[in-house]
Image (cartoon, rainbow, N blue to C red):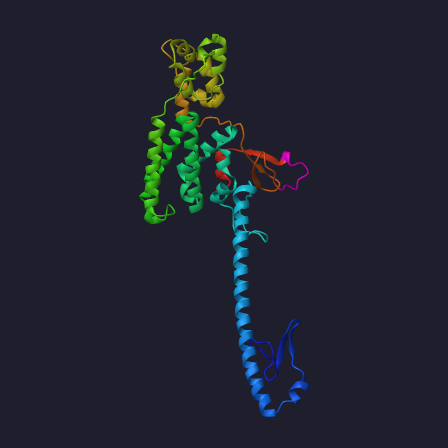
């Protein structure tokens, strides 16, 4: 029967540790020693060597454990670096397979796609803000604790960016108001595990939202110091052409409050007609016809009424892309491991609402 103890050497034998490893002692040396003395020395030698072997095993196990912990720590750091910085794409899988178990969640995608860097890009800023607004309305409880924390960190960067460049103030103010209203209703249900984390953490975050709202309310747009040409110095046809590039009717109203000349242009019926036709279909417009006192269609009033009834058309300079061949969600300027012959033909643009719909199961 083989010896199964921690010491792999068989009992009753004398072993000697050398540079090449453990070796049995020669019988010639043992034969020169008397039997009783040889047995005593053999027993003491065996105990000493057994103690050294056990100490060696303990030290070896400790070194192996430390090495394993160091490898796990280093690999975890590498995975973290890849998770947040290298891989800016994510495989969207909605069921378990032999290769992948489980499914991809909204919080995982929100962490992997590096929205923190996307808000610094002017082309992606409105896209990310709209996505933050949609998540604040209904999807915040579905995020994991890490994703909720990442959401608040990204929101803080958005506010700081707006405070620095003094742009998109109204849009971010509406985002904060939407988030605050949602949190007020969710915090009341904290006992039902609606939000992850202690309630004091969310109360502190709500206080930060109120502070950001106050900072945005106190912002003052600084006029440029250089005495160059302004919008009012341009001909009326150019001013009207610039106004036609605005896609939000509230921007037209705000622009008309600058001076009386711009106010007259902001009330142009053709301008509001094109704005209605851009955002809404002919069928939607026919259902909400409004006549003015002079018997003409009041396109301005119709626009704001249509906005309350139907969603406006969304258009972004840069959006997330979804590969229909390999089911990977990625940014347009990042490479993903696509195996299709023509990867560009397999990519489709994903709207903010479409992004959320990908993770509804």
Q: 168 or 350: nearer the eye?
A: 168
Apparent side of residue 206 relative to residue 29 in the rendered image (left or right): left
Q: x and y percent of residue 57 in the render?
A: 55, 70
Q: x and y percent of residue 125 in the render?
A: 48, 30
Instruction: Please name the residue shown 56% across and 88% down the image.
Output: 40
Q: x and y percent of residue 117 in the render?
A: 50, 35
Asked if the magenta segment contains residue 338, the reply would be: yes
Asked if 311 appears above or below 107 in the picture, the reply is above
Instruction: Please name the residue shown 52% across and 28% down the image.
Output: 123
Q: Number of marks in the image?
A: 0
For the stretch drawn in magenta, what is the main secondary structure? loop
Looking at this rendering, what residue extends furthest in the left direction?
188
Instruction: Please name the residue shown 43% across and 44% down the image.
Output: 142
**Can see residue 17?**
yes
Asked if the magenta segment contains residue 233, the reply would be: no
**Can see residue 359?**
no
Quarter in which the N terminus is drawn: bottom right
Q: x and y percent of residue 244 in the render?
A: 48, 16
Q: 98 or 337: nearer the eye?
A: 337
Apparent side of residue 239 relative to residue 332 in the rendered image (left or right): left
Q: Which residues are magenta?
A: 337-345
Instruction: Please name the residue shown 63% across and 34% down the image.
Output: 344
């Amino acid at each position: 029967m083989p010896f199964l103890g921690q010491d792999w050497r068989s009992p009753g034998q004398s072993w000697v540790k050398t540079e090449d490893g453990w070796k049995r002692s020669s019988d010639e040396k043992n034969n020169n020693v008397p039997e009783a003395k040889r047995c005593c020395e053999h027993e003491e030698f065996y105990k000493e060597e057994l103690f050294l072997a056990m100490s060696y095993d303990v030290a070896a196990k400790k070194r192996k454990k430390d090495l394993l912990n160091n490898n796990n720590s280093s690999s975890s750091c590498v995975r973290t670096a890849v998770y947040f910085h290298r891989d800016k794409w994510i495989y969207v899988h909605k069921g378990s397979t032999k290769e992948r178990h489980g499914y991809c969640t909204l919080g995982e995608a929100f962490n992997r796609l590096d929205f923190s860097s996307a808000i610094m890009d002017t082309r992606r800023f409105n896209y990310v803000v709209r996505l933050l607004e949609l998540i604040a309305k209904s999807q915040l409880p579905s995020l994991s604790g890490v994703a909720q924390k990442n959401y608040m960190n990204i929101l803080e960067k958005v506010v700081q960016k707006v405070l620095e460049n003094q742009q998109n103030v109204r849009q971010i103010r509406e985002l904060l108001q939407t988030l605050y209203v949602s949190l007020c209703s969710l915090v009341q249900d904290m006992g039902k595990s609606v939000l992850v984390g202690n309630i004091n953490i969310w109360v502190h975050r709500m206080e930060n939202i109120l502070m950001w709202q106050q900072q945005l309310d106190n912002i003052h747009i600084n006029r440029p110091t250089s005495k160059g040409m302004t919008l009012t110095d341009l001909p009326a046809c150019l001013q009207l052409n610039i106004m036609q590039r605005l896609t939000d009717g509230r921007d037209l109203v705000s622009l008309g409050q600058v001076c009386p000349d711009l106010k007259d242009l902001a009330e142009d019926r053709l301008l509001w007609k094109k704005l209605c036709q851009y955002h809404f279909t002919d069928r939607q417009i026919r259902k909400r016809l409004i006549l003015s006192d002079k018997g003409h269609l009041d396109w301005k009033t119709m626009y704001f009424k249509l906005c309350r009834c139907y969603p406006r058309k969304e258009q972004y300079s840069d959006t997330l892309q979804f590969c229909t061949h390999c089911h990977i969600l990625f940014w347009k300027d990042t490479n993903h491991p696509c195996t299709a012959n023509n990867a560009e033909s397999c990519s489709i643009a994903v709207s903010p609402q479409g992004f959320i719909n990908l993770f509804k199961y």
